[in-house]
Amino acid sequence: MVFVYRLMKAGKDALVSAKNVAVLTGAGISAESGVPTFRGEGGLWRNFRAEELATPEAFENNPKLVWEWYDWRRQLLKPLKPNKGHEVIARFEKRFPEFLLITQNVDGLHQKAGNKKMVELHGNIWKVRCLKEGKVTDNFETPLSKIPPSCECGAMLRPHIVWFGESLPYDAIQTAYRAANECDVMLVVGTSAVVQPAASLPIIAKEHGAYVIEINAEETPISDIVNESLIGKAGDILPEIERLLEM
Ligand code: OAD
């Protein structure tokens, strides 16, 4: 592993010849759009950490508090737009014959940028689920007129988000594992790589022979494992990589 700012020749060659590319993203890709990350600076809300709020137990004990957090996040997210990093990832979907975007983000900004071949490992903040019927519906009301919100059937709604201790959607994680097994290159962008199973995907990709490039504002637990670790902002580095591929 080498820490560099610019993509190395080996990384460029791997991307130029790649037929199958997977991209794994975390909160850092959305930071330059104004979305607060979970860890690091600005990661706290009313002094709570995500791990204290994004759990079934927290919701059971205090659904109002958990919904207030999500209502706050939804209000923050509503006016935000995809940034240069999201835009490059959307263009990469068209550049490579096989492509999958695997995101841990729930903000919907990748879809806004135009990505379609993607899986959302942790759900989507603009979807709600009925606690009684399990039905999932879109919900864009911001701010919410009633907290906690309720379904037409009268039961309480919960955010359609995968919380700590809950299983990931089966199809999404299986699709992600397959991409990790099969990709020629994996880009890992803006994730602290501490939350499983997403954090294991770059390791699986590397073990299966992929060239793994990390792009992150700081070193992470996988920086020593990947082929290249590019330290800096995704919104600077991804356009730089795209430019290099044109040269
Ligand atoms: P984190 O907040 O843990 O990590 C974000 C990473 O992005 C950090 O390593 C930052 O250094 C980096 N970063 C910040 N700004 C950046 C920028 N402009 N360019 C590149 N990197 C930048 O977010 P995740 O890894 O996504 O789960 O967190 C994983 C999961 O934990 C989330 O999906 C969420 C959270 O609790 C749930 O809510 C279930």
Image: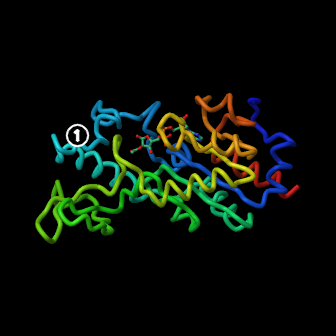
In percent of width and height, residue 70 lies at 30, 50
Task: Residue at 51% x, 50% y: name it.
Answer: 33
* Residue 114 visible within the image: no
Front-most of 182 and 155?
A: 182
* Quarter holding residue 75: bottom left
User: Closest to the observer: 38 or 176?
Assistant: 176
Task: Report x, y in % for residue 52.
Answer: 29, 34
Q: Is residue 229 left or right of residue 69?
A: right
Report the front residue among 111 and 195.
195
> Residue drawn at (17%, 62%), measured in percent from left and top?
132
Farthest residue, direction bottom: 152
At label 1, counting other C-alpha atoms closer than 10 Å, the crowd grade (few under 14, some 14-19, many 20 or more) is some
Image position of 47 with respect to 246: above or below:
above
Q: Position of residue 114 (x, y in %)?
A: 57, 67
Rendered-image quadrant of the N terminus: top right
Q: Amino acid at mark 1?
A: Ala
Res 97 → quadrant:
bottom right
Give the secondary structure at mark 1.
helix
Residue at 52% from the left image edge and 56% from the top image edge: 174
Identify the residue under disc 1: 58
- Taking the image as shown, residue 32 lies to the left or right of residue 60, namely right
